[in-house]
Image (cartoon, grey):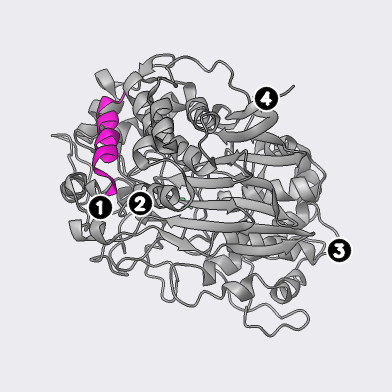
Amino acid sequence: MIRLILAAALAAPSVQAHPDVGKVPVQEGYGGAVATVDHDASKAAVAVLRRGGNAVDAAVAAGAVLGVTEPYSAGAAGGGFMVIYKRGKVHTIDGRETAPRAMTATSLEGIPFEEAVTSGLSAGVPGAVAQWDLALRRFGTLSLKQALKPAIEVAEKGFVVDQTFHNQTAANAARFKDIASTAKLYLPGGAPPPVGSVFRNPELAETYRQLAKHGPGWLYGGRLGAEIVATVKNPPVTPGATRNVRPGLMELSDLRAYRALMREPTRVDYKGLQVYGMAPPSSGGSTVGEALNILEALPKVGLHEYLEASRLAFADRNKYVGDVPGVPLEELLSDGFAKERSCLVGERAMPHPAPPGEPDGSYSGCPSPAGAAPEVTTEGPETTHLVVADRWGTVVAYNLTIESTGGNGIVVPGRGLLLNNELTDFTFGPAPGDPNLPGPGKRPRSSMAPTIVVKDGRPVLAVGTPGGSTIITTVLQILVNRYELGMSLPEALAAPRATQRNTAATQAEPEFLRLHRAELEARGHVFAENPEIGAATGLEFLGRGRIQAVAEPTRRGGGSALVVHPVP
Ligand code: GLY
């Protein structure tokens, strides 16, 4: 009965194409809250909450809308990680894209990274739809069919192109031109859609409609799956294009074998709080958690300590974390290991690169450094994150992605659906012993770090962000800003950022450099400018049922925070 009522309610027009009236980065109130990077997605989620849906229903509905309005960051042919607090327990769902069974440790070796980015070879078996379905069945009240309705409506009626969408299209124009199906959809008339125009994706609306009708099996072994496989194996390259677009290895059997997985969350106890995150194949939970433990072991915490703890945690992440058996997760997150690592944090920045530690359960004093760690590559602004809380206190932090901004650049012909290039998150090799080399059925290591903070068994805060491996440092810096430096959550999200990932130079935003460069350079830090790091979303429970929803004020054009019953 409840499902029928909700179905009827969701059938009513709810999300229309119009400019961003009512779009604000911070809103407070009662009855549930949402923050995403996109106003249409936030409106869809809050509409689900208002009609009696729960936070998981709203998160899936918003995720599907983001597949329409933020198609270069996320979508049904992508994947993601979802952290859910419900009735005193934290659950996580791994919807990570997966390598086909034909992929081996050497499949990406020697391929120029830029060529792999736009290829069938880099497309992982999509996880998003299986994840949505599992989340709804385990924790939601809506069916997949009901949860897809707002997205179908937005795809059909269209959304207003903003500067971010225009810029992202323009940045991808050269490779989009080389793929006939992608050029047809995203370069109408041969150019990126102008700012202020209404962009419709009727083929994606029909794809969602068919998914709603047939269920996930339509993708995982059915007709849509067959079309994805055909596209991956024979990318629709524009006649005359000279780009080397490699075919992929995906088979229909890989799609049939795909499963979204329930996993135990990571957890660290930090300053009387329990911080929950995503376990491998993401390195988000372990790296944020280890860095927080290192900070807690230090006598004082400021920006220098934040950078040093992050440097050390990345050294360990790079050596130990991947989709492999035997990741020493418990030891990486132990207080003993953190104390040993914290010994290396001095008054000056430590020499580069920081070596990984030995998370072996035997910790004594300060170990002498040994062996260098690999340096991580620079990462872009890809991916997206959303948070939702409902009136019953269920909270969702959800990172979703198609990897590069624009994924692999290949739209499935006739389906309006952009494929992911998540397999570029593997180490290409040769790199003996690297836990993140490709393998059959393996999930590439992620940095996604959807995070929920709990105190005395109740959720107090949720946060996450896009940004490749800078996701980890942005989440960490926001937690440091909030819990060490005394900022409110909106201040913590807005504050200028720096990211240290065991690289020689710390990347930092211009405003961070203006404020902190001199002081930190005097302590041995070396900086490189990065114009913009992350685009976070979060929420905080302020007491007596009051919730604060928070999105970026300006980065990536600013996000949208909404609550069900706002108060001034
Ligand atoms: N593709 C971004 C990540 O998984 O970290």
N-term-proximal mark, 3 vs 2: 2
| Lateral position of residue 304 relative to residue 411, left or right | right
- Judging by the rendered image, the residue that carries numbered circle 3 is 299
Q: What residue appears at the point 50 percent right and 44 percent down from the top-left corner?
A: 56
- Judging by the rendered image, the residue that carries numbered circle 2 is 130
Residue 153, image quadrant? top left
N-term-proximal mark, 2 vs 1: 2
The answer to whether mark 3 and mark 4 are in CB contact below 8 A is: no
Residue 449 visible in this rendered orientation of the protein? no
Q: Give me the C-alpha separation between circle 3 and circle 2.
A: 45 Å
- Judging by the rendered image, the residue that carries numbered circle 4 is 566
Label ID, residue 208: none
Does mark 4's beta carbon lie closer than 8 Å to ligand 1? no
Q: Main secondary structure of the magenta part?
A: helix
Q: Give me the C-alpha separation between circle 4 and circle 2.
A: 33 Å
Residue 239 visible in this rendered orientation of the protein? yes
Q: Give me the C-alpha separation between circle 3 and circle 1.
A: 52 Å
The answer to whether mark 2 and mark 1 are in CB contact below 8 A is: yes
Callout 1: few (<14), some (14-19), or many (20+) C-alpha neighbours within 10 Å?
Answer: many
Q: Is residue 87 above or below residue 404?
A: below
Label 2, secondary structure: give it: helix
Q: Quadrant of the C terminus?
A: top right
- Judging by the rendered image, the residue that carries numbered circle 1 is 220
Q: Amino acid at mark 4?
A: Pro
Q: Give me the C-alpha separation between circle 3 and circle 4.
A: 40 Å
Tell me the magenta residue range.
Answer: 200-216
N-term-proximal mark, 3 vs 4: 3
Does mark 2's beta carbon lie closer than 8 Å to ligand 1? no
Q: Is residue 112 above or below residue 313?
A: above
Q: What residue appears at the point 46 percent right and 61 percent down from the top-left corner?
A: 262
